[in-house]
Amino acid sequence: MEEDKYQQYEDLQKQIAEEMLNDERYLKFFAQYQEDSVQHFVRQYARHKANLLVFGDYTTANQRELMGTWQDLAWKGLREIQQKKLFDLSCRWHAEEVTNLPGIKISEDFENVAQYILDYTGIPDISETDLDLYLLYLKTPVVGSDFWQVIYSYDYQDYAGISQRYKKDQETDIPYYDFHNLHTGNHMLFSLPSIRLEKEQVYYLEGFAHHHVSPKADLDSDQQLDSDVSEASEEKPHLGTLDEDLVEFAERFNDRKTAQFIAGYRKWISEKPDIEIEWAFDYLKATSPEQVPIAAHADWQEAIFRAAATHRRKKAAELLPAIYDEYLLKKGAGIALTSEDALSEMRDPSQGKKYLILEGRRLRGEPRNFDF
C-alpha cells in the first residue's frame, strides 16, 4: 500500500541520517564544517537516498510526494488558523490593549513564537468553529496564479509590513487573512494605534546611536545575547545543501546510485521551460487516474494552474478533519506538535535589538527591562 511505503520512506530517512552521523568516514568529513549546516545537509541527503531506496526513480518518488503534499497542506492550514489568531493578538498588543503574553517582550518576538505556533500557549486552541471557517476558505475559488505562494509560506507576523499593505490597498496579500477579516470584521484591528512599536523604536535608535553596532555586554542571565556558536565553529565553512554539494558528497564516498538519482532530479528541474505551468501539468498528471475539471478561462495557462491549485486545496480539505482529530489527540496527551527538527533549526534574531532597546532605556536613566 502507498501508505506503508510512505511510512517506510519516513523511517528510512531517519535511519540513514542516524547512520551518517555515526559513521567514522563521514564524521571526519563533517568535522570541517559548521554543525548546524551538517545537520541540514544530512537531512537533505537522507531524503534523496530514502526516495531512491523506497521508490526507485524520481517519477515514482514524485507521485509519493504528491500524496504527502495534501497532508502537509492540511497541517499548514491548522498553523495558518493559529497564525491569524497570533497576528490579531499582536495588533492588540501593539495598541497596549493586552500585555504579559508568554514569550513576548518586543514586537519581533511574535515572529519567534510563530515558529512553534501550534504549541504556543498565548492563543486559544483551534476550535471546530475555526476549522469550519478554514474549510470554507479552502472551498473558495483560487484567485491568481502566484506559483511561489504554492511553494513557500507567508511572513505571517510582519506586523509593520502587513499593516502598511492593508492601509494602502485594503488587503493584506495573505489570502486567508483577507478571507478571515471579511467574515469576522477583524480588519478593524488595523485601526488600532501602534503604541508599543513606536516606544521600541525610540529606545532602539538611542541605543544604536550610542553603540553604532550591537556589542556583547554583561547582561542578566535571562537577557544574554545568543553566543552558543563557538569561535572555532565560526571559523569553519558552511556545508552547502545545493544539489551539486549533495552529488559531490555522494561521489566522494562512492554512493554512485544516489549521485545519479540527485543528478536526475536536477535534470528534471532544469528542463522545465516554465516552472509555474509545468508544476500544474506535473501535479495534474500525478493525480491520474482521477479526473480533474478545468474551468474555462481566457488564459489557458491560468486555467490549468487554477485547476491544479483548486484540486490541491480540495484534497487538503478532505484530509483536514482527520488532521484536526490528530491535533486534538496530541494536544490532549500533551504531545508537542512542533517537530524536533524544526525546533533545532529555530533562531532568535531579536537578541541584538533587545540589547539595544535595553541600552536605550539605560541611557535615559530608566530601568533596564521591557516594562515600558
Image: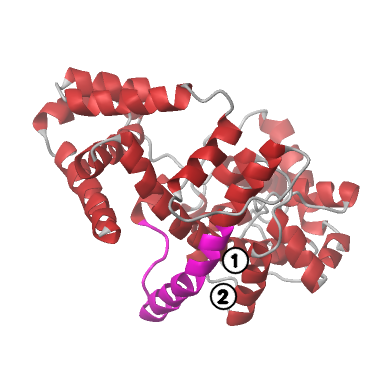
| Residue type indicated by callout 1 | Gln
Query: Left or right: 359 with respect to 69?
Result: right
Is 313 positioned to the left or the right of 41 in the image? right
Instruction: Write the residue at 58% across / 48% down.
Output: 308
Task: Tell me the SS state at disc 1.
Answer: helix
- Observer-nearest residue: 356 or 183? 183
Amino acid type, residue under disc 2 in the picture: Ile
Total number of numbered labels? 2
Between the C-alphas of marks 1 and 2, the distance is 7 Å
| In the displayed structure image, the side of residue 208 where residue 183 appears, left or right | right
> Residue 318 magenta-drawn?
yes
Depicted 344 relative to depicted 117: above or below: above
Which region is colored magenta?
A: 313-339
User: Picture coordinates of residue 338 (x, y %)?
Assistant: 42, 60
* Residue 22 pos. (x, y %): 13, 39
Q: Which residue is mark 2?
A: 126
Q: Picture coordinates of residue 181 (x, y %)?
A: 78, 65
Q: Name the element at disc 2.
A: loop
Q: Which residue is mark 1?
A: 82
Which mark is first along the chain, 2 or 1? 1
Label 1: how many Cα within 10 Å (few below 14, some 14–19, many 20+): many
Q: Inspect this view and state whether residue 365 appears.
A: no
